Amino acid sequence: MSKRLRDPIHGLIVFDIENQEVDRLAWRLIDTPEFQRLRRIRQLGVSEFTFPGAVHTRFAHSIGVFHVARTLVGVIRREMTRNGEMPDERKCDVALIAALLHDLGHGPFSHTFEGVQEARGVKKRHEQWTAEIIRNETGGIRPLLEAFSPGFTEKIALLLEKEDPEDIYHAVVSSSFDADRLDYLRRDKLMTGTGAGGIDFDWLIENIRVAPIVLDVPDAEDEASPRKVPTFCLDRKAQPAAEQFLLARYTLHEQVYFHKTTRCVEKMIGRLFRGIAGAAVAGEEAARRTGLPPRHPLLRFFGEGGETVENYLALDDMLVLGALEVMTQAEDLDISGMARRLRGRSLYKTLDTAEFGADKGAQAMRKRRIELQFKDQISQGTVILDDKAAIGIYSEIGGDEERMHKRLHILDGNSPKEISTLSLLIKTLETKKPFIRFYFSETADRDKARGTKGRT
């Protein structure tokens, strides 16, 4: 017996539930309410406002990541056998299930929601929510994991929480070639319709090797040896494909993830969330101020003591989008106005300082001038400044590009070297390119800031 899913990226994904115990567990996990919730969370958040085809979900992505993880586990077995070692099959299982469950903790509109929470002083990233959901004793995930193997829950949660790897199995879920990015790069390219960003997947997989890299160099006063950990590297002959892989990520960040319209919508939804969060603590007045029913999941979550796993799992993209209509009746004019704009795609108008030329000094001068000119509107939220986006060759949403195991290594002889030391192309793109944009609620204000009239 087997179960099959058809996927636009990977074709037929087969779960051999009769002969493969880990496949049987994966199939049961997919059927849990926690995993099914990912059907209601878009992989690219609000990108469908810009790219109409970008409606793929974290549900499809997570299953794709599991499929790629099986390929990477096969690479580990291949390379360990080549080196005369025996793979740890239980650790292989941990890596596979961790890959399947890695996105359980995403909130509505993913990184946008996470950014709002951080601005409110709640620095709890989706990885922490994922671990909490997995450990939840009253949820559907933990019983299945414990039935598979006692203590399996904690092994999965710890692997997903770890910031630094301890062995090669961690590379399946967190490395320069982890299963997550090997799925989303191809999936996001296809679903957004962008022509750039292709990767030579088969050649990359064929040329993955395992070698130890230095995670960090100890302090001068510390006599301990540098920490080393085995991770995925690439054979030297795959360097052109590796360069293209990094360029694909760079291109997707530039053209898709940091697209000016997408960033604008993210800022608008972020403002809506902040308005709801501020009103949710108003007790009986919360419903009137937001237009939401008194026990709406958003009010429960943002209310006093409401940030529980149960309340978090009640939130998703569809819930928020479905509530826009009632929020247009909110007494709070910021909430009603933003809900009305989002429902009808009446977006703020963008002014990118790159319009004033490539010179960074000139851009900075115009930024200061606009900030001064629209100081009151910025404080009121009718003008939004966005100066946090920047891309480099290692840009990654979540900001972990400084970690050495996330950087790409090429085998130079038998010694792994970070690719920028071997490739002038990659070295050139290491310097981050910032984006500085203003979003205006009124077209006239945008034109005034630009110094022109009537341009769209």
Image (spheres, helix red, strand yellow):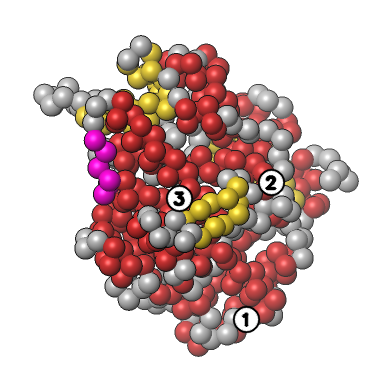
Q: Residue at x 67, y 66 (%)?
A: 338
In the image: residue 356, left or right of residue 249: right
Above or below, 341 relative to 267? below
Mark found first going from the N terminus, 3 or 2: 3
Above or below, 118 relative to 70? below
Q: How crowded is mark 1: few (under 14 residues within 10 Å), some or many (20 or more)?
A: many
Mark 2 is on which residue type? Thr
Q: Distance between the residues labelled 3 and 2?
A: 22 Å
Q: Quadrant of residue 34?
A: bottom left
Q: What stretch is highlighted in magenta?
A: 86-91
Q: Tell me the residue that label 2 is attached to.
A: 192
Q: Tell me the residue that label 3 is attached to.
A: 66
Mark in the foreground, 1 or 2: 2
Q: Is residue 215 magenta?
A: no
Q: Residues within 10 Å of mark 2 (few under 14, many from 20)?
A: many
Instruction: Residue 186: give x, y in percent of width and height.
Output: 60, 41
Quadrant (top left/top right/bottom left/bottom right) for the C terminus? top right
Q: What element carries label 1?
A: loop
Mark 1 is on which residue type? Gly
Mark 3 is on which residue type? Phe
Q: Quadrant of residue 353?
A: top right
Instruction: Residue 412: give x, y in percent of width and height.
Output: 38, 13
In the image: residue 371, left or right of residue 22: right
Q: What element carries label 3?
A: helix
Instruction: Residue 119: give x, y in percent of width and height.
Output: 46, 57
Mark found first going from the N terminus, 3 or 1: 3
* Closer to the camera in the image, 371 or 111: 111
Q: State the mark number for residue 320.
A: none
